[in-house]
Image: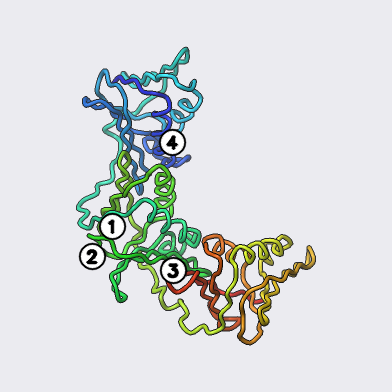
Amino acid sequence: MKATIERATLLKGLSHVQSVVERRNTIPILSNVLIEATAEGGLKLMATDLDLQINETVAAAVDQPGATTVSAHTLFDIARKLPEGSQVSLSAADGKMTIMAGRAKFQLGTLPRDDFPVIAEGELPISFELPAETLKQIIDKTRFAISTEETRYYLNGIFWHVSDDPLPVLKAAATDGHRLARVTMPRPDGAEGMPDVIIPRKCVAELRKLLDEIDGSVGVSLSPTKIRFDLGQALLTSKLIDGTFPDYSRVIPTGNDKILKIDPRSFEEGVDRVSTIATEKTRAVKMALDRDKITLSVTSPENGTAAEEVSGEYTAIPFEIGFNSRYLLDILGQLDGDTIEVHLADAAAPTLIRENDKSSALYVLMPMRV
């Protein structure tokens, strides 16, 4: 195999594929990236951790087609340190890969391409397209609520499902048991009959990175066990989480009658300021609601107390409720607009937060005892 490629092109392609590769691997081949120089011209790069696989095609001048695998992180680090604007020559033979650029020359050990595992996709019967901007929004507005508890593995991703209520929609939801985020959007053409799927956290993170460089639409193809995102030059394929997502609709409150309307930025800044003195143990921020006046306070046995008044529209009976400040800030950070609605019931019931009844995203937050 022999090819020449611009450093910037190689670096961009490698930055996408190497992040899929786990730093610690018991199987040596999984630390490698598969590099294939094709007769048509161009390099195909591929990396996998057996659950997630990325394929990327980059432009290159190919002198001799062929394929090999080499350490992904080492090659990426070399490419990063090569002189800007340089042409990089890659050649592989006899279990070695030679990388040359300017006066620099590296030789790396390789492993045969035949040992490289590939995720067998099988049939992916459902396919549809989503604008990259919509996909970004779905991820940004839900992923902070993905659970990191390995024991509840079925919560370690974003749940996608379609329903008719009353119009056909696609819903994406994530929860960790303390908070819930859900985005609803019109169902894309081709998504009818789509099975319920849970997209793993790592796939979501890699997809989000790739979306920053895409303007148009992303092709989505899936089966009950696999999903593939077609981003033009890059293809991301992932196994889905094999589990049942809980019926989250049961925790979305419908009868919360105490409504607070408030500017999300002043609310966020107030919570952020008073929570400065909160510690790991006492993340609770107390909200005392009175007529058009909300008092935020934090009491920390180690650090002292903090309080701040923020203005908002509130006409129901006064009461107090506590929230985990970090969870509340995560939600407020996703809300735009000049006012948001906070639907409350009592100090122990889940609270609903959204921009208004037309907005695509809604959030549910469980209170804390304070």
Q: Alpha-carbon neighbours of circle 3 within 10 Å: few (<14), some, or many (≥20)?
A: few
From the viewer's side, name the closer residue of 202 and 358: 358
Kind of residue indicated by mark 1: Thr
From the viewer's side, name the closer residue of 67 and 194: 194
Does 73 sit above or below residue 232? above
Q: Which residue is mark 3?
A: 359
Cα distance in 3D space between marks 1 and 4: 27 Å
Name the spot of residue 56 as percent of width and height, x first: 33, 37
Identity of the residue drawn at 44% across and 42% down: 22
Q: Nearer the viewer, mark 3 or mark 4?
A: 3
Q: Which residue is mark 1?
A: 225
**Residue lying at the far top of the rendered structure:** 103
Of marks 3 and 1, which one's residue comes earlier in the chain? 1
Does 175 sit above or below residue 7? below
Helix, strand or loop at disc 4? helix
Q: Which residue is mark 4?
A: 15
Kind of residue indicated by mark 3: Ser
